[in-house]
Amino acid sequence: MSRHLDVTFEVTRGNDTDFFPALEDALRHAFACAAGSGEKVILDVLVSSPAGAKAWAGDDGVEQYLDDPEASVFERFEVKVNSMGRVP
């Protein structure tokens, strides 16, 4: 997905929250936080317009957005990384 001004990504770990305009940056940060702590990290997709919903999830996303435009989180992912060590 290319960047869209109406789509923001929020990464939350414990009481710390960071915002990213690009999914790739949010994913890198969420993975690094989860791998470093062993705890789950939440990555929320925040959408603030029908155009943003279309950019994120296509026509179905627009329908979902219009069903509840006041929803604060459009989609939520839980990121947990379990290191399995070195594999011979």
Image (cartoon, grey):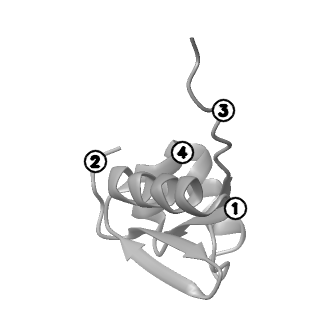
Q: Quadrant of the N terminus?
A: top left
Sooner in the amino-acid sequence: mark 1 or mark 4: 1
* Element type at mark 4: helix
Q: Which of the two marks, 1 or 4, is nearer to us in this view?
A: 1
Please say if 69 is above or below 37: below
Q: Which of the two marks, 4 or 3, is nearer to us in this view?
A: 3
Determine the CA span between mark 3 and mark 1. 16 Å
**Residue occupied by mark 3:** 84
The amino acid at mark 4 is Asp
The amino acid at mark 3 is Met
The amino acid at mark 1 is Lys
How far from the left and from the top, in percent, is residue 35?
56, 52
* Element type at mark 3: loop
* Element type at mark 2: loop
Determine the CA span between mark 2 and mark 3. 33 Å
Sooner in the amino-acid sequence: mark 3 or mark 1: 1
How far from the left and from the top, in percent, is residue 18?
43, 78
Determine the CA span between mark 2 and mark 4. 16 Å
Determine the CA span between mark 4 and mark 3. 39 Å
User: Observer-nearest residue: 27 or 40?
Assistant: 40
**Residue occupied by mark 4:** 59
Please say if 82 is above or below 23: above
**Residue occupied by mark 1:** 40
Q: Which of the two marks, 2 or 4, is nearer to us in this view?
A: 2
* Element type at mark 1: loop
Q: Which of the two marks, 2 or 3, is nearer to us in this view?
A: 3
Please say if 88 is above or below 53: above
Tag 2–tag 4 contact (CB < 8 Å): no
**Residue occupied by mark 2:** 2
Sooner in the amino-acid sequence: mark 1 or mark 2: 2
The amino acid at mark 2 is Ser
Residue 7 found in image quarter: bottom left
